[in-house]
Amino acid sequence: MTSRPAIGVTLDCEDAGGYSAFPWYALRRNYADAVTAAGGLPLALPHEPDLAEAYLERIDGLVLTGGAFDVDPALFGADARHPSVTVKRRRTQFELAVLRGALQRDLPVLGICGGMQLLNVVLGGTLIQHIPDAVPDALAHEQPTPRDRPGHDVALVPGTHLSRLAGCLRLKVNSSHHQAIAQLGDGCVANAHAPDGVVEGIEVPARTFCIGVQWHPEFHVSTADAALFTAFIEACRHD
């Protein structure tokens, strides 16, 4: 059997309560399932910024997952924080360290939802802090339907890496976010847009594999979602 590349998958974190009376890490199972189905070996990454380099020595690619929190607006130079914004400082501190290290090594990176937003910020871009306040006639990007069903369409940009691996120019996607890209980061190109103009995907053509999507492909709402994970895992292989 072809060896499975080791894929670092970032975790979410919660304070005491609910699942445990003590602070706990969390990861929806389908993140790991999607990596496994595509041929990777998922490895969960606890939030230890000082160990980021040690993790990077052991992984072949990085998945930045989403979560019910936001990138701190201070990281992209905002003067104020919208009331809707919530942050998880320790998680973001770790993800900044491991993402910057992955980019320095040109390791394949797949950013999902908030992971795409952090990728854009690390590359020098900015974010819309709250879509309903900034985008006229915005779609319901926090879709009311269950996450395992599509919420809206996106149009893929012809000629982009994402459009080539998807094999089409329009996808139905699931959507759960209230922030979005404002200014693209250095070297980034938009590869997908929602009907209201919101950027739904980015990529960095100069890198081996560096794609971010605003939706949640780990749910495999479309065949293109599985193709995205397959292409990512293939880029992580050394053999």
Image (cartoon, rainbow, N blue to C red):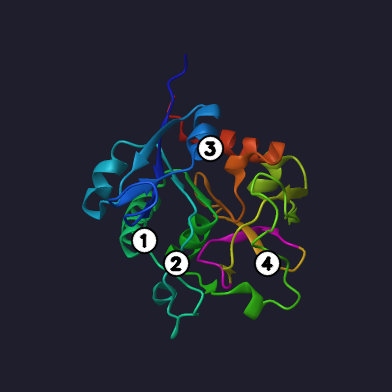
Label number found at residue 71: 2
Callout 2: 10 Å neighbours few (<14), some, many (20+)? many
Callout 4: 10 Å neighbours few (<14), some, many (20+)? many
Q: Earlier in the sequence, mark 2 or mark 4?
A: 2
Determine whether label 3 and label 4 are within 8 Å by CB.
Answer: no
Which element carries disc 1, helix, strand or loop? Answer: helix
Amino acid, disc 3? Asn
Q: Earlier in the sequence, mark 3 or mark 1?
A: 3
Please tell me whether mark 3 or mark 1 is closer to you in this view. Answer: 3
Which element carries disc 2, helix, strand or loop? Answer: loop
Compute the Cα span from label 3 to label 1.
Answer: 22 Å
Determine whether label 1 and label 2 are within 8 Å by CB.
Answer: yes
Determine whether label 4 and label 1 are within 8 Å by CB.
Answer: no
Query: Up-down: is 113 above or below 72?
Result: above
Label number found at residue 92: 1
Q: Whole-percent x and y of residue 192?
A: 68, 57
Amino acid, disc 1? Thr
Determine whether label 3 and label 2 are within 8 Å by CB.
Answer: no
Amino acid, disc 4? Val
Query: Up-down: is 97 above or below 148?
Result: below
Q: Earlier in the sequence, mark 3 or mark 2?
A: 3
Which element carries disc 3, helix, strand or loop? Answer: helix
Q: Which residue is mark 4?
A: 198
- Write the residue at 68% across / 76% down: 135
Magenta segment includes 186: yes
Location of the C terminus (image quadrant):
top left
Q: Whole-percent x and y of residue 149?
A: 70, 46
Please tell me whether mark 3 or mark 2 is closer to you in this view. Answer: 3
Q: Which residue is mark 3?
A: 30
Determine the image quadrant of residue 181.
Answer: bottom right
Q: Earlier in the sequence, mark 4 or mark 1?
A: 1
Compute the Cα span from label 3 to label 4.
Answer: 26 Å
